[in-house]
């Protein structure tokens, strides 16, 4: 059937008012239109492809089935390739074989494109599933990791590192000066004190005479903190000091030198050393006092007597002319004083409460005390080497009370340590009772000044 016949058919249908069945021409035109739509929609998503597929089905199915061959709703729809050839028969529908084949090819191509799109979507979903393993696999992997952690051998402990040492404070230097000096117990006392205080300080000795004292002090470096002085330097040092304390000014003698930020300061700790040593031995007051000797230590003994509440002091010296300088000091202190030769000691009927000997160690004396005086008066002999001294042995022979010069030395050294550490003889040290105990032990005496057994 040619195009004219198709046109007459269409006119006949219009005149009768009846709809005619779709023809092959109609199908071909629809397929051509679909080919164009597929060309425009090559990048369409799966949902859009499905919509196009539905349109194709709507167009082709009526031509295939016809009025008498509609498929049952429950039956499977035949494949496109199987049903199109039967429907598009050239002789029944007036379509050429070439046109029918072209339509079939277009439908097959559309179907392949749809299948390719569906395959791509499926492949993408599969890849996503591979990236995200299911929960069972994840749980299994976590369990294996936990097992590995538990069973893994513990790593060897890192060797303990020693804490970084704190940098030590600069070493401070100290020394006791005198001549002779080898017998001095000051190094033992001071070293024990600074060790107890945790100070890295050095304390030594130096044999220095009065003539060489100025040069010795001038040659000291900034590391020097102070000096302890013994005879014959206690009076020689006064002109070399920038400042002196009240007791050093009273006695005219300093046994302690402090180098304090460029200022050379002098102190006298002998007076308090005497008072503290006597208090430790049980003597806290004395009305009448004898002093043997007329030097610098005798002046400290005179001030100590005043602090103990003395009213009278008798001084016995080998040279009266060298001891007269003590009279003004006694008067300043409010004391009655008599200066006599040592040979006249204990010629009075009054027995003193206290006898203080400032004579150098090993020196013999012609001072003779009766047994009654030796039993009743307490003897403090500032000399400790050799021990017991001549007087000490005489007191001990009758059962008298004797305090060694080591006790005085220890207590005055404690006050020196206060000065060297704090700069103030009145400022107590940290744990001072412990410090004093180790100092006393270092020189072999107990808290009362008695020798340790």
Image (spheres, rainbow, N blue to C red):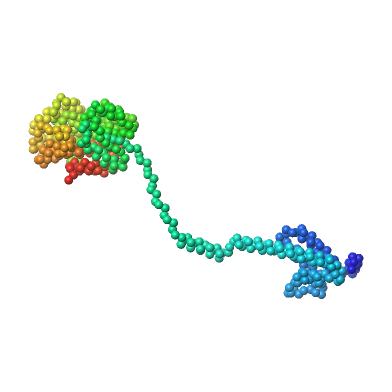
- From what the image shows, is residue 453 above or below residue 242? below
> Could you tell whether 240 is left or right of 113 in the image?
left
Say which of 364 and 407 sits in front: 364
> Could you tell whether 351 is left or right of 111 in the image?
left
Q: Image point 23% across, 28% down: which residue?
A: 210
Q: Quadrant of the C terminus?
A: top left
Q: Quadrant of the N terminus?
A: bottom right
Q: Position of residue 378 (x, y in %)?
A: 14, 38
Quarter where residue 374 is shown: top left
Q: Position of residue 185 (x, y in %)?
A: 22, 38
Quarter where residue 24 is shown: bottom right
Q: Position of residue 55 (x, y in %)?
A: 77, 65
Quarter where residue 376 is shown: top left
Say which of 23 and 42 sits in front: 42
Total tally of numbered discs in the picture: 0
Is residue 291 something that shows in the picture?
no
Q: Image point 77% across, 67% down: which residue?
A: 57
Is residue 410 something that shows in the picture?
yes
Q: Image point 21% across, 32% down: which residue?
A: 180
Q: Image point 27% across, 27% down: which residue?
A: 214
């Amino acid at each position: 059937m040619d195009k004219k016949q198709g046109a007459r058919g269409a006119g006949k249908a219009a005149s009768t008012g009846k709809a005619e069945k779709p023809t092959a021409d109609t199908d071909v035109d629809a397929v051509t239109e679909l080919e164009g739509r597929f060309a425009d929609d090559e990048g369409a998503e799966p949902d859009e492809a499905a919509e196009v597929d539905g349109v194709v089905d709507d167009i082709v199915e009526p031509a295939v089935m016809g009025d008498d061959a509609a498929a049952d709703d429950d039956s499977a729809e035949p494949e496109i390739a199987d049903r199109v050839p039967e429907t598009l028969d050239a002789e029944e529908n007036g379509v050429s074989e070439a046109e029918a084949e072209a339509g079939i090819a277009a439908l097959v191509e559309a179907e392949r494109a749809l299948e390719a799109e569906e395959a791509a979507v499926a492949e993408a979903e599969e890849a996503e599933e591979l990236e995200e393993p299911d929960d069972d696999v994840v749980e299994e992997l976590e369990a294996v990791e936990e097992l590995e952690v538990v069973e893994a051998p513990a790593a060897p402990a890192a060797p303990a590192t020693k804490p970084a040492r704190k940098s030590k404070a600069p070493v401070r230097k100290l020394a006791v000066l005198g001549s002779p000096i080898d017998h001095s117990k000051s190094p033992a006392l001071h070293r024990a004190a600074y060790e107890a205080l945790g100070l890295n300080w050095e304390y030594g000795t130096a044999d220095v005479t009065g003539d060489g004292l100025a040069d010795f002090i001038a040659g000291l470096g900034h590391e020097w903190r102070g000096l302890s002085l013994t005879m014959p330097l206690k009076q020689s040092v006064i002109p070399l000091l920038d400042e002196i304390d009240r007791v050093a000014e009273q006695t005219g003698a300093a046994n302690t030198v402090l180098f304090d930020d460029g200022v050379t300061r002098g102190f006298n700790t002998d007076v308090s050393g005497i008072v503290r040593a006597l208090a430790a031995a049980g003597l806290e007051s004395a009305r009448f006092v004898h002093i043997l000797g007329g030097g610098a230590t005798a002046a400290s003994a005179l001030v100590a007597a005043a602090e103990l509440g003395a009213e009278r002091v008798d001084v016995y010296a080998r040279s009266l002319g060298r001891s007269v300088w003590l009279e003004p000091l006694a008067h300043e202190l409010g004391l009655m004083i008599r200066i006599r030769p040592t040979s006249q000691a204990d010629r009075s009927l009054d027995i003193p409460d206290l006898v203080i000997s400032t004579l150098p160690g090993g020196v013999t004396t012609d001072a003779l005390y009766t047994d009654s005086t030796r039993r009743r008066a307490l003897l403090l002999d500032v000399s400790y080497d050799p021990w017991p001294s001549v007087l000490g042995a005489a007191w001990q022979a009758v059962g008298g009370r004797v305090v060694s010069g080591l006790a005085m030395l220890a207590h005055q050294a404690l006050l020196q340590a206060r000065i060297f550490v704090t700069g103030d003889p009145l400022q107590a040290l940290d744990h001072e009772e412990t410090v004093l105990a180790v100092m006393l032990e270092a020189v072999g005496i107990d808290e009362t000044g008695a020798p340790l057994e």
